[in-house]
Image: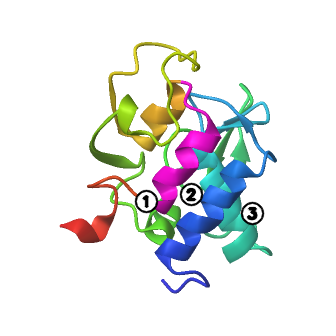
Amino acid sequence: MTYKNAPAEARELVALALESGKFKQGEGALCRDGKYCCLGVACEVFINTERPDFDHGEGISIHSSQDGRHSFGPEHDTSFLPFEVQEWLGFNGPEGHFELLYAEDLMGYDSEEMELDDDPASWDSLADVNDHGVSFKLIAPLFRNPPEGLLCDEG
């Protein structure tokens, strides 16, 4: 599929959105009760930049469930990126998996200043980083400078 933005440009747009303060951060779902995972923000940016006039019945779409979760795409999945968004970002999978990343590798991470949900020894996906309480401000650089293994063209 052809997109308006190349994968690196798409990832920069998501990083800017994460830093914008426009989205409230949540966990455990792409979007629930108005709070977003970093991957849910990516879905919103995709819709706004690549499909501003999208039809809810075609391709990527937004669906609401009774528990307040939103799913994006024909799969109605509330936790994972639709294939179209993965492709747009150049990601190798729906959770943003990458080689092991240690907390101290995060730019700006300070273990004494951050109160994370549990021991931040290591993570292996963007969903994991988000769901362990790392702020959007610290996640944004992972979109700009993807950890090894995140992108599909890395073999």
Q: As rendered, which of 64 and 108 lies closer to the eye? A: 108
Question: At numbered mark 3, what does the secondary structure look like: helix, strand or loop?
Answer: loop
Neighbourhood count class around disc 2 (C-alpha, 10 Å): few under 14, some 14–19, many 20 upward: some
Residue at the (27%, 55%) spot, across then down: 148
Distance CA(mark 1)–CA(mark 3):
33 Å
Neighbourhood count class around disc 1 (C-alpha, 10 Å): few under 14, some 14–19, many 20 upward: few
Give the labeled residue for mark 1: 145
Does residue 66 appear anywhere in the picture? yes
Give the labeled residue for mark 3: 56
- Name the amino acid type tagged 2: Pro
Pointers 1 and 3 in contact (C-beta within 8 Å):
no
Mark 2 or 1: the one toward you:
1
Left or right of 144 in this view: 104 = left
Residue at the (57%, 15%) spot, across then down: 115
Residue 154 screen position, x and y as percent: 23, 67
Residue 9 vertical position relative to residue 94 in the rendered view, above or below:
below
Give the labeled residue for mark 2: 74
